[in-house]
Image (tube, grey):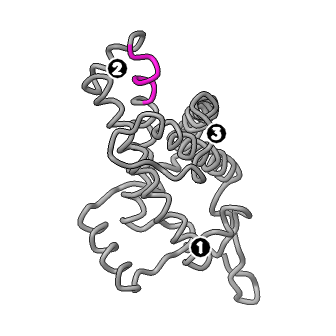
Amino acid sequence: MVDEAGARTPRIIHPLYIRVTHWVNAVAIFVMVLSGWRIYNASPLFHFEFPAGFTLGGWLAGALAWHFAAMWLLALNGIAYLAYCVVSGHFRRRFLPISLRRALDDIILASQGRLDHAPGRYNAAQRLLYVGVILAVIVAVLSGLAIWKPVQLQALTALMGGYESARRVHFFAMAAIVAFLIVHIGLAVAVKGVLAPMFTGRAEAPR
């Protein structure tokens, strides 16, 4: 927006509902990752363990309690977020369409430091990453349920290829989420004008 003097004035680019659900998701995922690493250490899938100082829960039972509490928070908040995005048209406006070719071009430009970022507008690479992490969260929740209740949810567990396969699906889904978080947080800190609007909701958004 432009005022009478010709100066650009901030406007809302992130509604309050989006900001609240975003930060609730952030807390839930943070708790799930750290407690998940402690759970992983109790029965490693691969030949490594996560440093104890980067885990949450102290011991297996404590980590499981944290993990399940955060899982329900993430699931309920995620459903509320997706419902709002679909009904309000937010998902369609911000994340669609997705072009793999344009996303690759944007990634190349970003690696060269030549990718412009306008607050309130997602480029092709961001759209691909955001939709990808939403899918990764859904897979993580479903595979987690398959691990938690393999008998009661045997159809879901079978869909994952069995209990041990479901554990691997869960691990790689969470790994994808962590990889997204590293890129997401790095860009939020490095790119001017990205982080503040997620608290205030306001920025000089493009028309």
At label 1, counting other C-alpha atoms closer than 10 Å, the crowd grade (few under 14, some 14-19, many 20 or more) is few
Calculate the distance from the C-alpha at mark 2 to the C-alpha at mark 1: 39 Å
Picture coordinates of residue 122 (x, y %)?
46, 65
x 36%, y 32%: residue:
167
Q: Looking at the picture, which amino acid does disc 1 mark?
A: Val
Q: Position of residue 78 (x, y in %)?
A: 56, 38
* Image spot of residue 185 (x, y percent): 55, 65
Residue furthest to the bottom:
5
Residue at the spot 59% in from the left edge and 71% down from the top edge: 194
Disc 3 marks which amino acid? Answer: Gly
Image quadrant where residue 111 sits: bottom left
In which quadrant of the rendered image does the C terminus lie?
bottom right
Judging by the rendered image, the residue that carries numbered circle 3 is: 58
Distance, label 2 to label 3, CA atoms, is: 30 Å
Q: Residues within 10 Å of mark 3 (few under 14, many from 20)?
A: few
> Disc 3 vs disc 1: which is toward the camera?
3
- In the picture shown, does residue 110 fall above or below 85? below
Magenta residues (range): 144-150
Q: Nearer the viewer, residue 27 or 67?
A: 67
Asked whether the residues under the numbered discs 2 and 3 touch, taking CB atoms below 8 Å apart as contact, a structural biologist would say no
Residue labelled with disc 1: 189
Instruction: Look at 48% across and 63% down and name the residue there.
Output: 182
Q: Is residue 45 above or below residue 207?
A: above
**The residue tagged with tag 1: helix, strand or loop?**
helix
Report the disc number at residue 156.
2
Residue 182 belongs to magenta span: no
Q: Residue at x 69, y 48 (%)?
A: 20
- Which of the two marks, 2 or 3, is nearer to us in this view? 3
